[in-house]
Image (cartoon, coloured by chain):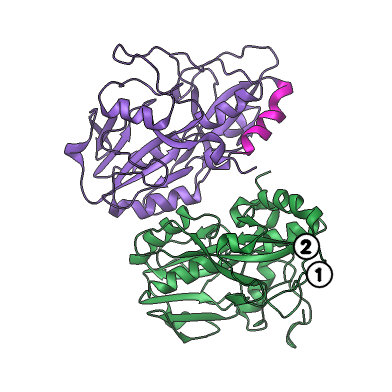
Chain colours: A purple, B green
């Protein structure tokens, strides 16, 4: 991944990454930055939708792994990134009004309100590192292309105003590494955890594996590769968006909020 | 454990237990009933306190393992116990008004309101079964005496109106079983999970292990036994109570709500 012209050295920690973003020296995707630090999806909603959204996350922990929820109006992630400011520390934001993209700013100070509740949700980088440490090569990692993501026929558990289908990410895993992939990702229930499906895409309502609903299609690298599917962090965003909240602010895809937590902090064993 | 005179056969499932309770045939503690089924602590709060309490649970998953949160006014646990009625299916309740015990009824139909939110929180039975399956004998199990519980100097992560110290339960573990106890309970992060402390009680602010703050004191059975401490479900109740909510309804100690989930459903690996 290429650094921007203004960065002489890639940030190695969450705090360094946030400082570079806040100073305007880093506006590109965060994949590969601050290795081993937990990166998060961001969803910011008005308080009157926040209880239902928290309930939705609690009922669907695989697609919605909550790393931190901030108090209404609070912009510092006190638990996972002390000293941070969620209004300035994400490289690029998206502002949605009634479900429609209205702006893609580099800070959200002008949108901030005292009733906004920020959700930090775990992202797949954490468990992808676990797969790679276990000798499973991920072809898309470090490229400009995105992983393949599909809307399935698996229903999430609805909560208040929020409901919708589960979105999954798909990875090709060598057949003799499938069990290891289950084991390695099971250690991280707080970040999508174990797969939701192994093998035939049709069994979960995916008609054509070369036509993903989000991201880019990938051919298997080896003839015996098995498609393995994990719950995807796109789910809560898709679900929240379809309920058309008055205001919703997220990170721009790939431009994550980097915390001070280490991947290993989220492992259960 | 003795059955009441009106029960000819101990219930073997969550549904059987709830049916017996609802019919008034079961009013005693639920320990030992419906083996392998997940039993839960119950906390019912008005909606205006529910977001903060859910946030408190999210920030403190070890003492507050959320099994299900019901929508405001909903009295059926649709996910963990379809067909249940939380107003009638707990053998004995406690009703607190502004933090003071006001009633100990056998149903709460007369207290029910459309703004009440029910929290079902995992209880230690699930991981105690895991310890016993791993050859760790728990002396108090199946007796009338309770486990020893202590208020520690470990702070919980506050959320809105809720804050307070962590309460732990203590078990004597043979020294050659301590590592196994960590492994066996790590499989259940959704029900208190791994211990929070092993060994010297003073390191977590416990002065006298024979003087618990809740429950009964226990002598070690073997000279080499090690005291091991787990986050305890008394924590959220103590914390909620100290904030003196207008109304709070809980189960009476030991008289749990039994779900249709099996202990193994909560294991991560």
For residue B7, above or below residue A127? below
Q: Quadrant of the N terminus of chain A?
A: top left
Determine which of the numbered discs, if any, sits on residue B221 in the image.
Answer: 1
Can you give x and y, in whole percent of width and height, for residue A50 in the image? 34, 51
For residue A94, above or below residue B212? above
Can you give x and y, in whole percent of width and height, for residue A175 in the image? 71, 21
Instruction: Identify which residue, B41 or A166, lies in the foreground.
Output: B41
Instruction: Identify which residue, A63 or B196, lies in the foreground.
Output: B196
Write down the chain letter for disc 1.
B
Instruction: State the residue at coordinates (61%, 79%).
Output: B91
Can you give x and y, in whole percent of width and height, for residue A225 in the image? 67, 18
* Separation of residues labelled 2 and 1 (CA atoms): 7 Å
Total numbered labels placed on residues in the image: 2
- Residue picked out by circle 2: B225
Assess disc 2: are there few (<14), some (14-19) or many (≥20) residues with their C-alpha within 10 Å of its C-alpha: some
Report which quarter residue A85 is drawn in.
top left
Circles 2, 1 touching at the beta carbon (< 8 Å): yes
Write down the chain letter for disc 2.
B
Q: Is residue A184 magenta?
A: yes
For residue A200, above or below residue B37? above
In this picture, which residue range is highlighted in magenta?
A175-187
Determine which of the numbered discs, if any, sits on residue A216 in the image.
Answer: none
Q: Quadrant of the C terminus of chain A?
A: top right
Q: What element does badge 1 sit on?
A: loop
Q: What element does badge 2 sit on?
A: loop
Residue A92 seen in the current view = no
């Amino acid at each position: 991944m290429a650094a921007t012209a203004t960065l002489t050295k890639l940030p190695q920690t969450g705090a360094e990454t946030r400082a570079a973003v806040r100073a305007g020296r880093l506006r590109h995707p965060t994949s590969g930055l601050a290795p081993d630090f937990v990166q998060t999806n961001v969803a910011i909603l008005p308080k009157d939708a926040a209880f239902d959204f928290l309930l939705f996350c609690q009922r669907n922990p695989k697609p919605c792994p909550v790393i931190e929820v901030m108090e209404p109006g609070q912009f510092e992630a006190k638990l996972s990134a002390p000293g941070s400011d969620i209004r300035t520390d994400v490289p690029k934001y998206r502002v949605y009004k009634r479900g429609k993209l209205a702006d893609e700013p580099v800070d959200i100070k002008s949108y901030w309100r005292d009733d906004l509740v920020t959700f930090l949700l775990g992202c797949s980088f954490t468990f992808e590192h676990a797969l790679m440490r276990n000798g499973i090569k991920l072809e898309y990692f470090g490229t400009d292309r995105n992983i393949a993501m599909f809307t399935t026929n698996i229903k999430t558990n609805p909560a208040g105003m929020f409901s919708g289908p589960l979105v999954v990410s798909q990875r090709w895993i060598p057949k003799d590494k499938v069990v290891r992939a289950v084991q390695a990702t099971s250690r991280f229930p707080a970040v999508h955890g174990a797969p939701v499906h192994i093998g035939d895409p049709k069994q979960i309502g995916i008609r054509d594996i070369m036509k993903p609903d989000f991201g880019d299609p990938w051919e298997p690298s080896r003839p015996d590769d098995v498609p393995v599917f994990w719950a995807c962090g796109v789910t809560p965003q898709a679900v929240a968006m379809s309920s058309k909240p008055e205001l919703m602010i997220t990170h721009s895809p790939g431009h994550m909020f980097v915390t001070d937590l280490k991947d290993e902090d989220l492992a259960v064993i």
